[in-house]
């Protein structure tokens, strides 16, 4: 069996109203596929890259363009239809292979895109999350590392991230430091351990509040018991994620970090209800929170001026 390291870049809708909802909720439309094949010594033996002209989310979201350096004009000039890109990639993959990705988002996005184009998802082979294997064999911290930080920790040279082929090459470099034979053999049990250790909780707030501000200031939302030590944890500043969603981070006295997401809805009597999810805090979630907090502060500053 051959290892194919896969990375995808995708565009996203500008808001929930513009999101494609059938036949699937299309979170992202693939705009770039990057992949490398590894030989028996985990060295790169072949490379693949193709840009895709989007059909559903045609205008590149500013956040995506900033991250990937891809512009709408690039895709219009160099992109090919998804069906053609997928056909090229499928032929390049050949037979008897598995996918290795950094994290598990790429496979979900690939499945959604195949569904929206009504392409058989049976093409997708066995998939392995290298982020999970890296944590198990190298850091043993039970948390997610970004690909850039993993490459740096292993002493490999820096690379320009968020280019699909570059990220695939970076992931392949991480592979070369790992015992992939053991990882593949023990992957199912590794996933079970990860699922067991993942600390997240879902809490539906029973009380209704007259305003979102009062809801977010309530103890029921702002405080919770730390699963590690049972001490009371208090949420930090709230940041906008979407119109009906806010996020925060918190740190317990035991130094355990948490990422908090609150979804709220308006009731028929104009009061508000909410649900809260709590996750372990990792580098990616902290980076996302800081980005959303900065955006929130800019919005507040504009409102204060007006």
Image (cartoon, grey):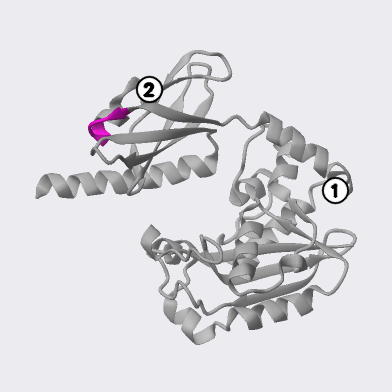
Determine whether, in the image, residue 305 is placed left or right of residue 21.
left
x then y, percent, for residue 170: 67, 58
Gap in angstroms between the C-alphas marked 1 and 2: 43 Å
x then y, percent, for residue 116: 58, 70
Determine whether, in the image, residue 18 is placed left or right of residue 160.
left
Q: Is residue 211 magenta?
A: yes
At 60% from the left and 59% from the top, the residue drawn is: 159
Question: Which mark's residue is nearer the viewer, 1 or 2?
Answer: 2
Residue numbers of the magenta segment = 208-213
Q: Which element carries disc 2, helix, strand or loop?
A: helix
Q: How many labels were placed on the picture? A: 2
From the viewer's perspective, is residue 267 above or below residue 214? below
x then y, percent, for residue 82: 60, 78
Foreground pick, 253 / 104:
104
Quarter that holds the N terminus: bottom right
Q: Which residue is mark 2?
A: 220
Determine whether, in the image, residue 242 is placed left or right of residue 276.
left
Q: What label sits on residue 184 in the rendered view? A: 1
């Amino acid at each position: 069996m051959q290892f194919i390291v896969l990375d995808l870049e995708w565009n996203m809708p500008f808001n929930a109203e513009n999101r494609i909802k059938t036949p699937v909720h299309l979170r992202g439309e693939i705009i770039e596929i990057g992949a490398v094949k590894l030989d028996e010594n985990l060295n790169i033996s072949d490379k693949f890259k193709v840009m895709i002209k989007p059909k559903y989310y045609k205008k590149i979201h500013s956040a995506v363009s900033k991250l990937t350096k891809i512009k709408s004009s690039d895709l219009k000039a160099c992109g090919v239809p998804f069906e053609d890109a997928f056909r090229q990639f499928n032929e390049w993959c050949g037979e008897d292979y598995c996918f290795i990705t950094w994290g598990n988002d790429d496979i979900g996005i690939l499945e959604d895109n195949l569904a929206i184009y009504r392409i058989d998802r049976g093409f997708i082979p066995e998939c392995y999350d290298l982020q999970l294997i890296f944590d198990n064999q190298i850091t043993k911290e039970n948390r997610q590392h970004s690909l850039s930080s993993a490459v740096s920790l292993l002493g490999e040279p820096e690379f320009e991230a968020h280019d699909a082929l570059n990220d695939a090459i970076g992931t392949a470099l991480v592979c070369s430091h790992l015992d992939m034979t053991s990882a593949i053999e023990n992957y199912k049990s590794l996933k079970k351990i990860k699922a067991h250790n993942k600390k997240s909780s879902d809490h539906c707030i029973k009380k209704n509040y007259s305003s979102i501000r009062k809801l977010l200031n309530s103890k029921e939302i702002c405080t919770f018991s730390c699963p590690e030590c049972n001490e009371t944890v208090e949420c930090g500043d709230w940041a906008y994620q979407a119109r009906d969603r806010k996020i925060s981070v918190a740190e317990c006295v035991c130094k355990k970090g948490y990422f908090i997401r609150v979804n709220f809805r308006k009731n028929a009597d104009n009061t508000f209800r909410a649900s809260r999810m709590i996750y372990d805090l990792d580098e990616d979630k902290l980076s996302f929170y800081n980005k959303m907090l900065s955006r929130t502060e800019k919005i507040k500053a504009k409102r204060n001026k007006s």
